[in-house]
Image: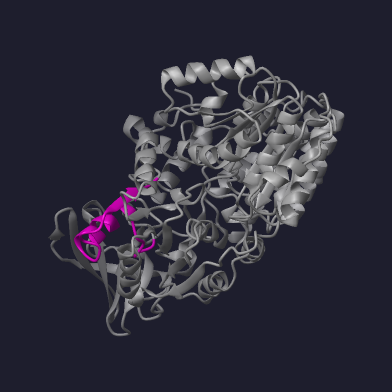
Amino acid sequence: MEITLGSEVRFLRGVGEQRMKKYQKLGITTVEDLLRHLPRDYTDLRRAVSIGAAALGERQVVRAILGKKESEHQLRRGLTVQKLLALDGSDTITLTFFNGKYTVAALREGEEYLFYGRVDGSLTRKEMVSPVVYPGDTGGLFPVYPLTAGLTSRGIAKDAATALASLAEIPDPLPDGIRRENSLCTLDYALRTIHSPSSPEEVQIARERLVFDELLALSISFMEMKRGRLGERTQPMEPVEMAPFYAALPFSLTGAQRRAIGEAVTDLCSGTPMNRLVQGDVGSGKTMVAAACCWFAWKNGRQSALMAPTEILAEQHYRGLSPLLEGLGMRVGLLTGSSTAKEKRERKAALKEGELDLIIGTHALITGDTAFRDLGLVVTDEQHRFGVAQRMTLSGKNQGTHVLVMSATPIPRTLGLILYGDLELSVIDELPPGRQKIATYYIGGDKRQRAFGYIKKHLDMGYQGYIVCPLVEEDETGEGPPGLKAAVTYLEELERGPFAGYRLGLLHGKLKGKEKEAVMGAFAGGKIQLLVSTTVIEVGVDVPNAVIILIENAERFGLSQLHQLRGRVGRGKVQSCCILLSDARGEGARERLKYLASTGDGFQIAEYDLRTRGPGDFFGMRQHGLPQLQVADLAADGQVLYRAQHTAGRLLEEDPGLETVPELSARVKQMTGMVSGGM
């Protein structure tokens, strides 16, 4: 059959049904999805060195001839090891493979190969563990892709090459005039080159085109959303004296909180639907800003909805806000997936009849049969856990609804204005008085047992803690860096060893929603003393009794992400502690971790992270409800962004419906989750 961009990848030669299921875990279904699954890096096979010239402690490509293969040995159930010897002239290097039966079986003694990995051992006895192996005649830059279990970079590169060989010239969504005035290559050249470049210069040419496409689509989507919002009108709310609300609080608000409330109230009274982001560090008091706005809407006779990403967070908001707001006369309800059928019926009926002033819940609030009598304000907590379309669905329950977004992820102001291009921005840049700084320590693996003892001391005192790992399960591809902790196997080690007799729990992203809720419920209820987790705890976990967190392989995370993880402790009155554990040898990684240990200011950390690492943290696995950027780097691609924004503005001015560029229009809708007729 003819292969097109829209063909399913299973129809490619050598793929089939089983391999397609693995691709689907990466979000790849079609040939176009495969071609847009871009390399995250390249191994430079042009710079292969001899065994004698290989530097200890560095990852590099070594050219050698495969010598003798030793027999495979079983270390324990599920773990085998096999050693090989490679040589060039008088020098030898030992190659060790764990669970590498099929990799080793494909290698032939006496053949020349390129072995890529970290060189360890000594000057006279060099060794490499789990190297990536390439045929000796492989050259150029070899792509390294984001992976999942059962897929390798070599396999993806082969499938991409098969797809490209099957396709005629790839159609270009950009008009020739725009492409030429921005000095861009064709899309066909970009996609063919990015998967198989001969030089870094070719990568740069292809990458610039793909970056421009991405930022152009993003800029158009922002402009369309903002243009649509500014054209809307709504009945303005009337000014209300805020003193009664402030008087009911058991504490004084900070100046930053009052400023954010004032900005939001101005929006509510403007006659244009509010679309405002309230951004503040962990513990800065964003929820009180939201509560003030809900109270203001109630004083104007309007209903409010507060949507949280998890049931646990929704219940936390309900427990925290209902005593305050009900004390002021408001009627507050809770609606989540776990609410009984009777509770759901009663609360939905109360909303429709106007008998509830504020409903707090999860995505259950956006189901089709939830109706409001007069929804005036929608608050979404931790916006990056919701898609833009979900937020707009909820606000669309009532024409002209005001929207307030809360985010605890500190983002540099310039990046925030781009990232939240359809939102106005309020920043809470001061913490309430009396909030304790979290003591943060950076240690090496040689002090791990001492750290465990420190954690056990806290557990024995009745407190709780976290241990965070970068992986869910051990890397099965052999291409990942060695020594990374995986939550599943690490939990078993800890239960058998240093934490035997303690109540441990496991939390990671591969668990089903109900399983995650059950684990977090057990942790919040004190049934679990120590939670071994991945970064799934990064947002919205509020357990005041958890006072200590240890983060394994801390160099693998961005500083802003580490700061969010650190914010899981220090939520009560007890002095809390964060331990960053890393054996990273690179000076840059060590400096970054030392910087985090020296400051608790999330905005300073975000600025430092953007300068030194780029915006990977902000555009990584999650993207704050907006499409994930696969190739653009806003720290490095500022000039391309400006060109893309200029082009977007001109295109929309000349052709508001993008009718002359249908492929680009389709790409914009695909990127933003837009549907025909708007959000």
Toward which corner of the image does residue 237 lie, by quadrant? top right
On the image, the x and y values in percent for residue 193 come to 57, 48
Quadrant containing the N terminus in the rendered view: top left
Instruction: State whether residue 625 is above or below residue 118.
Output: above
Side (left or right) of 651 relative to 362: right
- Give the camera-side residue of 139 and 55: 55
Side (left or right) of 277 relative to 653: left
Quadrant containing the C terminus in the rendered view: top right
Q: Which residues are magenta?
A: 481-508
Toward which corner of the image does residue 437 lie, by quadrant? bottom right
Looking at the image, can residue 86 be seen? yes
Q: Residue at x 79, y 49 (%)?
A: 642
On the image, the x and y values in percent for residue 515 come to 34, 38
Q: Residue at x 38, y 79 (%)?
A: 56
Residue 506 belongs to magenta span: yes
Looking at the image, can residue 369 be seen? no
- Give the camera-side residue of 521 and 59: 521
Side (left or right) of 180 relative to 32: right
Q: Residue at x 52, y 58 (%)?
A: 567
Instruction: State whether residue 70 is above or below residue 532.
Output: below
Toward which corner of the image does residue 628 lie, by quadrant? top right
Side (left or right) of 575 relative to 434: left
Residue 614 belongs to magenta span: no
On the image, the x and y values in percent for residue 648 come to 79, 38
- Give the camera-side residue of 491 and 63: 491
